[in-house]
Image: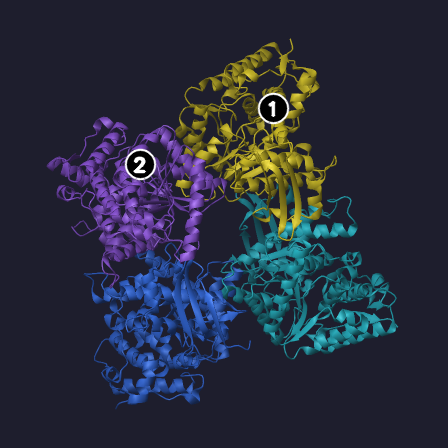
Chain colours: A purple, B blue, C cyan, D yellow
């Protein structure tokens, strides 16, 4: 294929295209409050799924001639794509999965624009966020009642080695054979492998309604384009709501090797599970990788034991190089989840009961100032410390792959982190190990740390 | 069947039951702002579909022991019905269509409670109402893009004679044979017959997705319970939004004989079509009845010519006793609608272009005072006069079948109407003719006029 | 609609059109062994469904210009209809249900032509017939495993009074509300009413896969065209295999008022149920009609008691004017059938166990000679006598509505029947009562008895 | 998983289980004419799909304790599996795809047993075979009318190298992206890779009804178990009917590297295409492999040019290491097929027009005698020589992987082949090249040639 850009008109497959003229106008509105810029950025990300570029800036730069226009026709909405990435097309036809993704973007951007405030007077701020996440997932038709817990969230790096990628496919395959569904954060690597494996397994089991849920957010989507296998794409407004969506929608969690981002997600989960109120909730959480990747979880496990202690280390299992075992444990864990939800009358489709502390729900803007104010000492509960550590890592991820973070580092230099000496040291060891394991980026020669540990 | 009340627990068929705890609480809230009373009243109406009672008061009184409780289970929402009408059940099982209706009520009451204001800054009040109607229909999944115009709204009386009822079935049958769908206001008579006829025709044509849309409102639903054939029940918040829903969703209109309510609907439509801006819009509008029912439309036609003039009379066709002809003309009319929407780029699924004057969108509260202030003179445009006449008739319908209206008449005596002498006289003749034709109620000996024409 | 004949090309909806060139040739073969004549006759019958003509001869005569040609196109088979009855079309398009029926005819005629002999060496003649009926029903996709017994065969007259017709709709409605399916012999009257009623009830219960099975045969189909509601049309090669298809496919039986033909079917059933081997089989059999039609079943009941005795009379129930009661009893009866099949390991979808005597399976050619040789005396078992009586009545039906029978009577005069005096007398009384009740034809002035009782 | 055998009862998903007691008895019949042995062998093959064993004898030996019993229950047919391969189960549940395959075996064995002769008097022997293949495919529901030509048959070795296997996946993926379906001969390697690739591509294109057709035969199925992705398994009675099924069902052909069997299939195709009558038929035929596998097709191409000449070599294209190009050419080729079928009125779903010479339809029993009588000289047409060469290779494949062939070689020593010296020499070179390229078996040290070239 020699051409790199294609212009084309596409219409959605189903009733996603029932928009009002006001909604169409909002999507085309290039003013400050309008949705055009966000829409264009997400649409480009979705179209760029075959690409190897994993920096938002690179993507936006390469396709700076890209434009998307939306209009209403008598049969419904039409999108006109101008200078779109040719990889999204086969013989001039947009790949159907990508077509769906475009309209998922439309759906979610409009919904958030509509709803961001108000809806539920009398609720606490924390409950309001939980409710908003619920409303977004329901609006995206992602909540399926009457279905026994079977949604496995897979986390891990999007730039992993070939062997690790093959392993994520095997784990997805074994889970798919057991009728489990897959939810990831979109993008390649550990976000894609389990879905491919599950697709083959679902075909063998004649499961026609297998779910491959991808939950993304505008800030990251360009760097981690959803794979077209994703058949339910959901764009949450920010990372905190996105993480809450994973936790409330998913019934079990598998973590593959990754980098700092993956460690951040682990800390987020531990910050929740260490809450006293959540102590009795069954919550399958398995860390796994192929032979040869043991170091990643050794590093993470060591860090958790050293900073959060043994109770935290008891919340997860580590399985090395045994996809079958992972799937078996997950199946048993999901049975416990099912029993628990039945006993407590909790909905199968949304985990209302799990308490998420407000600290973990709030948007953490990783400014230099905010990073400097983090408390990385031990004068707090374990779950509070987990939340602080997670913010530290979140900032570091932002400094590496998110646009504003990258720019801030360029302007103000590395972040300054404060806290107890041994914790800071553990953080230092953790990050150093990731760099040594080449976990920070695939091209490790391009890597520059975006933080400094203050003494 | 000897028992008259049944208590039972029901769960919905599909994902209508994905509710948040906050929504469940709102439906159970018996305080002023809560939804319980409205919910109980609508649920009872839906369950009482087999009944012959056509007064809301009678229904509420007879089933005063009825209660409905909603709760969240691990598999989804559950409704507990206490002392529900036994006619809704077959061998102890709730009829499936009624089950669906219960959850349509839940869906629409919660949606309205959520949205009633706000959503769209910068729009005119009229555009906001149109947009709200659009949002409600979309939320009810009633807007189907990619489908050629085929939705025929049928209006007419809910207490008509057997011959007229049989005729509505024949018309529905002929339209169903041509693949047309039916939308009515719920209830028996002309609201039910076309659906029964279309059901048989759709079976013969192997149309499995025939649509039988019923659009109701809380104020009237108890008196006009939806028939279980209705497979899309929509509860609009009030009569004005309900009428707008008909007009924007429907592609063609058939009016069968009815009473004052039907005449009111005719005036509503004429009030719209007489607008200058709507002059070029194809809008199939057919008045029809069996042999023996000619008088009704003669009366109406005479009234329209005398008050609104010949142009108004040119907006509709009258067909007597020829179901085949009605269906043929409707099919041709819908072809014109299709062509027009294609040319103008208007959506097939929602008639945005048709201008509805704000006067017709506003809630008319038929208090004695409001009725007294109506302008029934000729010092205004035809469409303005149509709107005023429609309000007059609306008040009269309220005084007959809606709870508050009945009570107001009991307290304050008949409404007083002002206006030009000949118009008032025509109104008098119209109503007298309806009474003579026994169009005001089936048991005409119970009828008492709820208005007086002021000199 | 003023035109009476339409010529049109039609293609089937699904894979019924995968025919080989050899099969196409056979359908076009006008030679002695070819299928053309049979195909043309059945196709015409199917197209003539709206007609009031109930004599095969009249139908064939009126549409003597009708022709049907079949050809293979790249997308599948195409039928060209020349001078077909206009009533089968709506706006020039063949009604979809009739389209399906045409291809059911193709399917069944080809299958029989292919299979009539051979298939199963080592079986008794009786078992071979039972197996052939099974093979035909399976090939027609009429056997649905995994489904609890719910198929109710409805028998009765095709020319019944309006009140009786309305009653068959009510019974079909009540059965449809309980999820039951309907199987009849095609044609109007009691063959159509239950399907219409069940269609409405299935719509209310949201049953999208309701079954309306029509089982016909080439000799009768022109006089009793299948109604387009029939969504599974099966053409059995002769009346005996057709009756066996009813008995093995159906799980319960409702008999409405009819004429001689209905009485014949009752005798066929009793001939089976009186077999010693079938004594323990639950077999719901209900005779029912509206108020005003009691005489029919009184006549039949009297005849059965007088000729076959009390045990025969204990095999059925009579319900007068209570559709709800009929449906309730049928539901309970089907529960017993379900239990029995479970216990005995018998298939839900085909009643292999029921023993049908070979005498009832053999084609009875009602020639004057064969009629003369019937044994209507009491020197035989009850079930044998039932079979003989059934042949007598079968001959009489043939003499009235089937082509060769009518011709034979015209040539040779009435049939001569021999037997015991009191039985012959009862037969005489039965037929006289039917004539008095106008059960032999609706236009009773046209009726001429086709038989004489020999002394 | 430590256990190797599982016993379990399984029931089919759909109406494959509507069997007569006579059919059940035939499947259990262990006598000479009974189907039990064949059924057991095929059932075992289907259950053994995960195995690495590629010799029928090894499979039968390892699972000699395996048994399968079939019985009729009230809900349908039940299979009891005793000591079945544990790899067919996940957590004690049979993989759904394998469940389907078991009942496909039942379907096809019974159908063949029923039909093997007779059906169509007046046809030539060749036409009768073509008709039988048609009837079997239709009975297996494999003929889909109304669908544009999109079925690509993929041939090639079942024991190929990893790189070649990965390439077959890529080709399948590119074809799947273009909406094409895959048909292979079952088994691993080139029979499985294209289906896996297409499965992923179909998921991305939201094609839910992708077809993965596997056509096998009792003699080979144990050595080449169908992969569970196969969602239409068809068991043809012998290799000649199997090859005809490929040719008449498929619309385009891709040949991957393989061994002698693959070369045999190539000769079969050339034997057909070299027929004068087939000269104008578009017939996409592409030989392709990854970089590094060029030698295989060089060898084959050289052999074809040397024995059959340049015209034969013009019937196919060779594409090296370009999956995208293969898919593009196939798409264009299928467009030509579509046009040709439209022009000539040929069915999309079965290629009736292609003439297959009777010589290629007849079962070739590769006895020592038959092999000795082959004519491998040039005193015949090209297509006749192709057929003779194909028989020679067929015998060689049988001698390697089919039970009776292996036994015959053990008893009587290698086959003796006669013919023109240069042709025999080319055959010798061909086979030697295959051995050198390790194409005869993966474990080439086990390979022993089963033939000798007679001087």
Q: Is residue B182 visible?
A: no
Disc 2, SS: helix
| Residue D198, picture quadrant | top left
Q: Are marks 1 and 2 in one subunit?
A: no
Residue pictured at 51% horizontal, 26% vertical: D156
> What residue would you read off at disc 2?
A301
Residue nearest the observer in this picture, A194 or B224: A194
Residue D94 % position (x, y): 55, 41
**Screen quadrant of the N terminus of chain A:** top left
Residue pictured at 61% horizontal, 73% vertical: C325
Query: Compared to C432, does D56 lie above or below?
Result: above
**Screen quadrant of the C terminus of chain A:** top left
Residue pictured at 30% horizontal, 72% vertical: B240
| D286 horizontally vs A70: left or right | right
Q: How many labels, in total?
A: 2
Residue nearest the observer in this picture, D149 or A421: A421
What is the chain identity of the residue bearing mark 1?
Answer: D
Q: Nearer the viewer, mark 1 or mark 2?
A: 2
Disc 1, SS: helix
Residue with the most extreme top position: D455
């Amino acid at each position: 294929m020699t051409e790199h850009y294609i212009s084309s008109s596409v219409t959605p497959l189903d009733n996603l295209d029932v928009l009002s003229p006001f909604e169409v106008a909002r999507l085309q509105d290039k003013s400050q409050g309008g949705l055009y810029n966000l829409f264009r950025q997400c649409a480009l990300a979705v179209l760029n799924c075959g690409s190897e570029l994993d920096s938002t800036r690179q993507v936006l730069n390469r396709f700076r001639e890209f434009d998307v226009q939306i209009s209403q026709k008598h049969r419904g909405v039409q999108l006109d794509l101008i200078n779109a990435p040719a990889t999204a097309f086969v013989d001039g036809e947009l790949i159907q999965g990508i077509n769906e993704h475009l309209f998922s973007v439309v759906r979610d951007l409009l919904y958030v624009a509509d709803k961001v405030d108000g809806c539920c007077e009398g609720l606490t701020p924390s409950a309001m966020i939980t409710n908003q996440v619920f409303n977004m997932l329901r609006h995206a038709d992602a909540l399926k009642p009457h279905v026994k817990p079977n949604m496995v969230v897979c986390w891990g790096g999007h730039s992993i080695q070939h062997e690790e990628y093959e392993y994520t496919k095997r784990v997805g395959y074994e889970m798919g054979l057991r009728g489990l569904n897959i939810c990831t954060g979109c993008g390649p690597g550990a976000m894609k492998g389990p879905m491919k494996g599950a697709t083959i397994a679902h075909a063998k089991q004649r499961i026609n309604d297998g779910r491959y849920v991808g939950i993304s957010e505008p800030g990251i989507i360009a760097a981690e384009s959803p794979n077209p296998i994703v058949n339910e794409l959901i764009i949450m407004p920010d990372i905190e709501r996105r993480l809450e969506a994973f936790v409330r929608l998913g019934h079990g969690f598998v973590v593959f090797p990754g980098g700092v981002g993956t460690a951040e997600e682990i800390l987020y989960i531990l910050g929740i599970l260490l809450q006293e109120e959540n102590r009795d909730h069954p919550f399958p959480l398995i860390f796994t990788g192929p032979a040869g990747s043991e170091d990643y979880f050794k590093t993470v496990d060591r860090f958790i034991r050293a900073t959060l202690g043994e109770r935290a280390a008891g919340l997860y299992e580590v399985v090395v190089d045994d996809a079958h075992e992972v799937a078996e444990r997950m199946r048993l864990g999901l049975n416990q989840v099912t029993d628990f939800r039945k006993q407590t009358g909790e909905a199968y489709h949304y985990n209302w009961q799990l308490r998420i502390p407000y600290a973990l729900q709030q948007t953490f803007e990783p400014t230099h100032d905010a990073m400097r104010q983090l408390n990385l000492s031990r004068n707090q509960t374990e779950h509070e410390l987990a939340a602080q550590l997670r913010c530290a890592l979140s900032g570091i991820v932002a400094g590496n792959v998110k646009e504003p973070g990258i720019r801030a580092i360029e302007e103000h230099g590395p972040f300054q982190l404060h806290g107890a000496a041994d914790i800071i040291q553990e953080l230092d060891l953790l990050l150093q190990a990731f760099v040594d394991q080449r976990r920070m980026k695939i091209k490790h020669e391009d890597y520059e740390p975006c933080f400094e540990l203050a003494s």
